[in-house]
Image (spheres, helix red, strand yellow):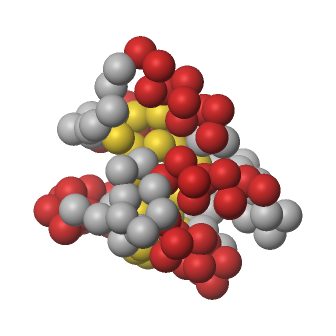
Amino acid sequence: MVKVLLVEDNEMNRDVLSRRLQRRGYEIVFAMDGQDAIETAHRETPSLILMDLSLPVMDGWEATRHLKADPVTKTIPIIALTAHAMSDDRQRALDAGCDEYETKPVELPRLLKKMEAMLPQGESQ
């Protein structure tokens, strides 16, 4: 089973997306802020991270920079999930180290396609 770290501070968003992904066979682990995301990524070694960018304690941009600078976590694909939908927001997320970008509200078929493309061979659902 593919393990996905869902970094989301909004309980409703976290609940809805995690249930939809679990129904498709993904194992979901959670982090509520950027610092928690870094610690959870080290502890759980997920195959993929879905990173909200507007987070308390440490935002998703900073958490992504930390994860991509760390030899232990730098190869984990990160998809930014954000309500920030201005033209420069996508580039800002990619510049921080995110491998892909998805706006909220999430269109699940499009997100799933991006997730499948990011997963290492043999780990897709």
Count of number-bearing discs:
0
Left or right: 83 with respect to 27?
Answer: left
Between 12 and 24, the one nearer to me in the picture: 12
Q: Is residue 24 visible?
A: no
Locate residue 45, reporting x and y percent. Answer: 65, 74
Between 9 and 25, the one nearer to me in the picture: 9
Q: Against 21, is 91 above or below?
A: above
Locate residue 92, reporting x and y percent. Answer: 54, 30
- Residue shown at 49% from the left, 76% from the top: 36
Locate residue 11, reporting x and y percent. Answer: 19, 68
Q: Quadrant of residue 24?
A: bottom left
- Residue shown at 80% from the left, 69% from the top: 72
Residue extending farthest to the front is 57
Residue extending farthest to the left is 12
Q: Against 99, is 3 above or below?
A: below
Q: Quadrant of residue 33?
A: bottom left
- Residue shown at 73% from the left, 53% from the top: 68
Left or right: 89 with respect to 91?
Answer: left
Residue extending farthest to the right is 71
Between 39 and 17, the one nearer to me in the picture: 39
Q: Is residue 67 visible?
A: yes
- Residue shown at 40% from the left, 34% from the top: 102
Q: Quadrant of residue 17?
A: bottom left
Residue extending farthest to the bottom is 43
Locate residue 118, reporting x and y percent. Answer: 62, 42
